[in-house]
Image (cartoon, rainbow, N blue to C red):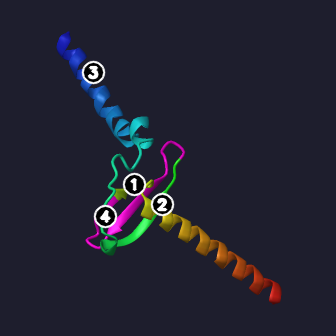
Amino acid sequence: MDVKLAFVAALVMVIYAPSLQAAKPISLVERCYCRSTMNNIPRNIIQELRIIQTPNCPFQVIAKLKSNKEVCVNPESRWVRLFVRNVINKRKIQKAQLKSLQRSN
């Protein structure tokens, strides 16, 4: 009788296993990309910076290096704050110039 029960349990697992593998646990879905950050990265090896903001995680800054490696950068460091401020100011200026061009046409 135990062999039959084990066979039925194995059969049930085979049937339901693909659907269980496709679903990700909530803990993996809501996990933050940056768990640890670096403060001192030479700016000349940074290719681009990405800013990620998700509802469950704090403000995250990811630097893509020239070696195609991605590292998390401390968003509280002074140079990152200045960079973000400069990007925001440039976008404001671009929007203002675009609006003035649209008004003149």
Quote the CA–CA distance across marks 4 and 3. Answer: 57 Å
Residue 65: in magenta span: yes
Mark count: 4
**Amino acid marked by disc 1:** Asn
Q: Which mark is residue 8?
A: 3
Which of the two labelled residues, at mark 2 and mark 3, occupies the earlier sequence position? 3
Q: Secondary structure at mark 4?
A: loop
Quote the CA–CA distance across marks 1 and 3. Answer: 53 Å
Tell me if mark 4 has few (under 14), some (14-19) or many (20+) residues whose alpha carbon lies within 10 angstroms of its own: few
Q: Which residue is denoted by mark 1 in the rendering?
A: 74
Q: Which residues are magenta?
A: 55-71
Q: Quadrant of the rendered structure where residue 62 is?
A: bottom left
Quote the CA–CA distance across marks 4 and 2. Answer: 16 Å
- The residue positioned 71% from the left and 81% from the top of the image is 98
Q: Which residue is denoted by mark 2 in the rendering?
A: 51
Which of the two labelled residues, at mark 4 and mark 3, occupies the earlier sequence position? 3
Q: Which residue is denoted by mark 4 in the rendering?
A: 41
Q: Nearer the viewer, mark 1 or mark 3?
A: 1
Query: Can you see residue 57?
Result: yes
Residue at the front extreme, as displayed: 78
Quarter of the image with the N terminus is top left
Residue at the bottom extreme, as displayed: 105
**Amino acid marked by disc 3:** Val
Tell me if label 1 and label 3 are in contact, CB under 8 Å: no
Residue 75: in magenta span: no
Query: Can you see residue 25?
Result: no
